[in-house]
Amino acid sequence: MQPIDPEHHDGTSDATPGGAPDRRRPGELAFAGALLAASLGLLYSAYGISGFEALSAPGSVPMATTLVMVVTAALVLLRTARLPLDRAETLAKDILPLTVVLFAVALVLYGVLLRPLGFLPTSALFLVGAVKYLSRRGWAWTLAVSLGSLIVIWLIFRIVFSVLMPAGILPEAEVIQLFRDLLQGDAPQ
Amino acid sequence: MSVLADVLTVVTQPQLLLLVGLGTFAGVYVGAIPGLSVTMAVSILISFTFSWDVYPAISLMIGIYMGGVYGGSRTAILLNIPGAPSAIATALDGYPMALRGEAGTAIGVTTVMSFIGGFIGIGVLALAAPLVSDFALRFQPRDYMLLAVLGILLVGSLSQGSLLKGIFAGALGIAIGAVGRDPLTFAERFTFDFQILEGGISFIAVMIGMFGVSEALGQLHHVDKDAVRQKISRIVPSLSTVRKHLPLSLQTSSIGVVIGALPGTGGDIAALMAYDHAKRVTKNPERPFGEGAMEGLVAPETANNAAVGGAFIPMMTLGIPGDAVTAIMIGALFIHGLNPGPMLMIDQPDMFWFIVGALVMANCFMLLFGLTGIRLFTRIVEMPRSVLIPMIMLLSIVGAYAVNNSVTDVYWMLGFGVFGYFMRHYGYPLGPVILGVILSRLLDDNWRRAIISEREDLGRFFEGIVTSPLSLVLFVSVILIFVSQTPVWAKAKARVFGRKGEQQ
């Protein structure tokens, strides 16, 4: 079958999982090495569960799977090491551009701020920052698009799916109650 | 008669019908927008719908599944960017057709063909699943175990990637699924003495990370790609066109159903294999493949929608997912306290027939939305990625948080997102990881049951495999997959066919 490669071998599905079959992408060897090391660590940990006590022991399947991981990771490492390095690609351009690193950091920050600050303020900060950075358009457009979509998302979650996110510094529940009371024409309780 | 009533549940309850319709509508757009995939949408939806009843939740997911598998074709035709993985092959001939100004015809044909494929898939599901589930009652624990292993191996062996990496991904998934206290003996597994790991890793966090965040991070490479406008002409295809391609569509639908029904492999792989098949059997296409051959549209589009029905067969009858989306749906049923497998088919046949009914309605909605609303469609698809990517990330975080109200899950999700990002770039498939996570418990339980019933004797275990026809077939399939990847196979093939064996 003729290989089909839609998006610069970055992997889109199980049918076309990405990677370059005949070349080694930058960082691929290090990744394969890290996987082997992690698999060895997991195999050791699996051995610690119940050792070779019995075939039906809680550690048997974990030991078998981690052994498979070690063997496949080692074979992948060997094959990868034999492939010629792809000189046309660089780690900073094709694998891990600055944008991706920035976004990964921003997502972790989001996780850190979510509880103390609450869902709406954290998401507003994230969306405004991210949309501004990616679109490089004016502030008015950025604010309108990101805050507008945040409100839509929040309404859908809160009303349709009744998902509760951390309220944080905004008195979210009180605002909703106020609206409910207004709609029903009742006096606030 | 009760079967008919169950099938019609979805029609008699307007709320469910509305949800299927909404789901299909959303699915067509989710599928069409590059960067949004069905797997992503369904995994995020699990966490939003878990407070709902099971029927509405399943209705929505089925709509999104059916619509999403089809929706990818539109962007493949109009922009040469497959909107969803199952439309990768559609772009090969769909885009050249659009360049000739036949975008409308191409969209019309794909819609009708997806509809035909979808119905064949559902038909096979309705006919085969009850038979398979009767048969499944006779499955031994070792058969379940072998089926689970087979499913994980099939993805790696039928895709264009490396089988080794596929096996690694599957084993990793099984290991992730084993984290926490063992349900039988309460022994700690892979917890490294952290209390937080004792309850295991939330599989929803793994799914959303792998299919949501890793995809969004990957899309950051393509922020600046522009959308290209195409003029769209007449859409509804003529009856003669449909009739002409009916024989091929029946063949490729069968490929789709079979690939869908095989554990693990879904529409994306089915579409590529069907395209390959069409290329081999079409002797005199009106235009060469790759330059706008109609057959190149018919084959993948029938196959990927036929695979939807197919994928439900192992899911409903055995509790073994037919592809990544059904893996996620099994997770959703778990959350709702249902355990898919032969007993579910016997205890709650209404659930099965309801799903069949919902699929039929989703398929009809797909035809309806497919042949209308093109103007609205082109607007929505032009949504800039600079807005779309942050939104996917936000939805992923909310989805991961909402299940357990836990920030830890968010960190797991982010961790697996970054890990999945690297896996994609280096050619490791993500589907087997999810299959492994979902199948981990089934594999472990059945292995232990099997080996205990053989009094811990491996010799007796293999004797059992060799003497039972079913186990033997499964076991030989597993071995064949391994052999097919070795040089021995290529040599044997060369000897049999008298030419050099094709490398995968």
Image (tube, rainbow, N blue to C red):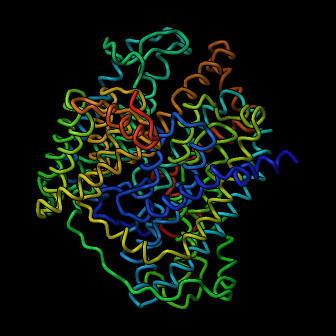
Task: Count the numbered circles shown.
Answer: 0
In this picture, residue B369 sits left or right of residue A92: right
- x and y percent of residue B339 in the render? 64, 31
- x and y percent of residue B25 in the render? 52, 62
Viewer-closest of B299 and B232: B232
Classify B108 as above or below B195: below
- x and y percent of residue B260 in the render? 60, 54
The residue lying furthest to the right in this view is B1
Q: Residue at the spot x=64%, y=49% of the render?
A: B16
Viewer-closest of B53 and B489: B53
In this picture, residue B411 sits left or right of residue B276: left
Q: Residue at the spot x=40%, y=77% of the render?
A: B78
Classify B400 as above or below B18: above
Q: Residue at the spot x=49%, y=63% of the render?
A: B28
- x and y percent of residue B365 in the render? 61, 64
Question: Which quarter of the rendered picture does the C terminus of chain B lie within?
Answer: bottom left
In this picture, residue A175 sits left or right of residue B248: left
Specify the quadrant of the image occupied by residue A47: top left
Viewer-closest of B351 and B493: B351
Classify B162 as above or below B367: above
Classify B65 as above or below B255: above
**Is residue B172 visible from the viewing direction of this image?**
no
In this picture, residue B473 sits left or right of residue B214: right
**Is residue B428 visible from the viewing direction of this image?**
yes
Q: Residue at the spot x=22%, y=56% of the render?
A: B220
Specify the quadrant of the image occupied by residue A189: top left
